Amino acid sequence: MSVRVLVADDQALVRGSFRILVETAPGLSVVGEAGTGAEAVELARRMSPDVVLMDVRMPDMDGIQATRVICGSPETEGVRVLMLTTFDLDAYVYSALRAGASGFLLKDTPPADLLAAIRVIALGEGLLAPSVTRRLIAEFSRRPEPGQQVARQLDGVTEREREVLLLIARGLSNTEIAEHLHLSSGTVKTHIGRLLAKLRARDRAQLVISAYESGLVTAAR
């Protein structure tokens, strides 16, 4: 599998470091660099990368705005965004995922993990760093009780699919979900495919958002 990557960061040194890292990895290549969110949008449209490594805070248009434009445009609907942040920017997690980002990693992530994340995102999966997931849960724990949101937003989702969605939101892998529910891996994949279609989600990360927004998952559950 060949994965084409666009690097978007306002610091030239950081962009150069990511380029070197990515291009030394088998099957990965950098097709462009952007120093602003606006440049990232323009290059995404022109280069059609598989994955954009997107910094959160950039001039002209920040990473969240750029992600919203890229993920919401028909001409770049196949482009996946992997957001990179630092601990003091974790408050942006919810907004970025709602904008369409497929994953979030911290900038101090080990190089091997970052390369693995790029491949995961390119395959259409979602990925969240554990600390980012905790922050996401904390964000929703401050929100009002969901009331009847579950019934409205999960209308048409079967009981088994809800069980799978709940475990996805808790960070379990397909294998772990299969073991927990005593299902085959193929059956779990089928349930996830149906959830993506029914909830109109781009990937696993968006399923997590749906689980929390619907009220199916709460910080205490």
Image: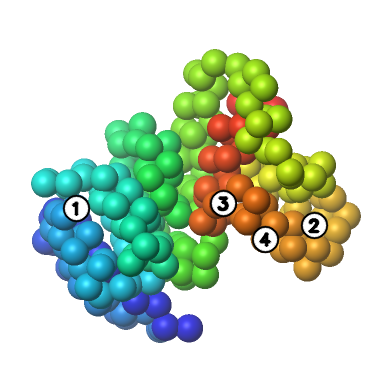
Question: For the residues marked 3 and 1, what is the alpha-carbon distance in whole angstroms?
Answer: 26 Å
Expressed as whole percent of the image width and height from the top left, the position of residue 169 reads 63, 42
Callout 4: SS: helix
Instruction: Provide the residue designation for mark 1.
Output: 37
Numbered badge on residue 178:
2
Left or right: 143 with respect to 38? Answer: right
Number of numbered labels in the structure image: 4
State whether residue 61 is above or below residue 190: above
**Number of other residues with Cα within 10 Å of mark 4, as a class: few under 14, some 14 to 19, many 20 or more:** some
Q: Is residue 46 above or below residue 156?
A: below
Where disc 1 sits, the SS reads helix
Contact? badges 3 and 1 (CB < 8 Å): no
| Mark sitting earlier along the chain (1/2) | 1
**Tag 2 or tag 4, which sits nearer the N-term?**
2
Which residue is the site of mark 3?
Answer: 200
- According to the picture, the residue beneath numbered tag 4 turns out to be 193
Q: CA distance from mark 4 to mark 2?
A: 15 Å
Whole-number angstrom distance, CA of label 4 to CA of label 1: 31 Å
* Residue at 54%, 61% in the rendered image: 125
Among numbered discs 3 and 4, the one appearing first in the sequence = 4
